[in-house]
Image (cartoon, helix red, strand yellow):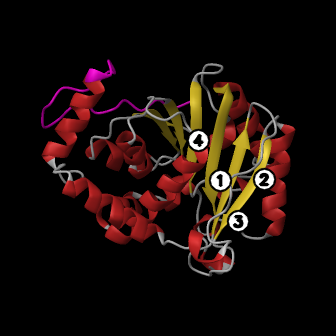
């Protein structure tokens, strides 16, 4: 992607992600597929406890596609995004997570240690831009990472899929994350592929541990395409007689599972509790 076509160079995120752009994230099957693939990989890198519902922060949650992946895994989540239009789409999709309107560069306004982990898809690179005269990318990145660190538990991870413009941006981002108290680094999946190459910043709060192994770095064993993995997963689910994803039966089954776990769940109705957006 050339720099002249990068979204963050065209307009601030709250302007770029207008009503028309937001609709693409609920109607374009290719965009939906890519977002879900990257969310699944981010969740894999998050290393949450198996068979245990966790409370996850979704930063730059957009229309709630990444949140749907968290739902599938039985987790509870809260999403924050700067675009009112994207949050409106998430509300129309009746996502399970709570939604908050906010600028990640102004910090995460949450209780200390409340989240078991955090994910973010395609949002982090926006902080490297100065969309206003008052914006200082170094200060905004540090503010974001330091407040994020504070609201994560002491054994939590945060995983960011992002699109760095160049190596200088990677250095800028990782430097501020480490200054804010995080450990970790960048995992690059499929580094030799132009289309499949993806950057994931993996941050840890509980001390320095080895980074997860990147995909596509050891020949055939790690070169299964995301779409292939998802196709196999969907076939396995259908073979077990489970309802198709996003069908009415699927949604009702998901809500019933949340109720069994003792989690707050909206009642079954056509207009189940639209989420309140809180600006800070």
Q: Indicate the quadrant where residue 256 lies.
A: top left
**In the rendered image, which residue does mark 1 sit on?**
124
Q: Are marks 1 and 4 in contact (CB under 8 Å)?
A: no
Instruction: Give residue 121's position: percent from left, percent from top.
Output: 55, 54
- Distance of label 2 from label 4 (alpha carbons): 22 Å
Looking at the image, which residue is at 62% across and 81% down?
Answer: 194
Vertical position of residue 177 compared to residue 152: above or below: below
Q: Are marks 3 and 2 in contact (CB under 8 Å)?
A: yes
Kindly report the secondary structure that dominates the magenta region of the rendered protein: loop
Q: Quadrant of the C terminus?
A: top right
Tag on residue 173? Answer: 2
- Label 1 neighbourhood size at 10 Å, few (<14), some (14-19), many (20+)? many
**In the rendered image, which residue does mark 4 sit on?**
47
**Mark 2 against mark 4, which lies toward the viewer?**
4
- What SS does tag 2 mark? helix
- Mark 2 or 4, nearer chain start: 4
- Distance of label 4 from label 3 (alpha carbons): 24 Å
- What SS does tag 1 mark? helix
Give the residues drawn in magenta, as a range: 260-280
Q: Quadrant of the N terminus?
A: bottom right
- What SS does tag 3 mark? loop
Tag on residue 164? Answer: 3
- Label 3 neighbourhood size at 10 Å, few (<14), some (14-19), many (20+)? some
- Distance of label 1 from label 3 (alpha carbons): 9 Å
Vertical position of residue 132 compared to residue 263: above or below: below
Looking at the image, which residue is at 16% across and 51% down?
Answer: 241
Asked whether the viewer can see residue 24, the reply is no
- Label 4 neighbourhood size at 10 Å, few (<14), some (14-19), many (20+)? some
- Mark 1 or 3, nearer chain start: 1
Asked whether the viewer can see residue 269, the reply is yes
């Amino acid at each position: 992607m050339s720099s002249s076509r990068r979204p963050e160079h065209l307009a601030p995120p709250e302007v770029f992600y207008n009503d028309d752009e937001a609709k693409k994230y609920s109607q374009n099957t290719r965009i939906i597929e890519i977002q879900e693939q990257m969310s699944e990989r981010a969740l894999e890198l998050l290393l949450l406890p198996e068979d245990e519902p966790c409370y996850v922060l979704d930063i730059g949650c957009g229309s709630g596609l990444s949140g749907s992946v968290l739902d599938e895994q039985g987790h509870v989540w809260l999403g924050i995004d700067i675009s009112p239009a994207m949050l409106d789409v998430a509300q129309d999709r009746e996502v399970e997570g709570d939604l908050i309107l906010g600028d990640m560069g102004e910090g995460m306004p949450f209780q200390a240690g409340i989240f078991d982990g955090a994910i973010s898809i395609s949002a982090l690179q926006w902080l490297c831009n100065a969309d206003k005269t008052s914006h200082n990318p170094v200060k905004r990145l540090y503010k974001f990472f330091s407040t994020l660190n504070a609201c994560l538990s002491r054994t939590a991870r945060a995983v960011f899929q992002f699109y760095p413009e160049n190596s200088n941006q990677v250095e800028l981002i990782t430097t501020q994350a480490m200054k804010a108290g995080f450990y970790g680094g960048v995992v690059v999946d499929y580094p030799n592929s132009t289309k499949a190459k993806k950057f994931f910043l993996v941050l840890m709060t509980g001390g320095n541990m080895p980074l997860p192994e990147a995909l596509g770095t050891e020949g055939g064993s790690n070169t299964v395409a995301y779409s292939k993995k998802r196709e196999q997963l969907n076939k396995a689910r259908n073979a077990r007689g489970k309802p198709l994803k996003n069908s009415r039966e699927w949604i009702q089954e998901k809500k019933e599972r949340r109720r069994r776990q003792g989690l707050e769940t909206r009642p079954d109705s056509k207009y189940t509790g639209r989420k309140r957006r809180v600006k800070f």
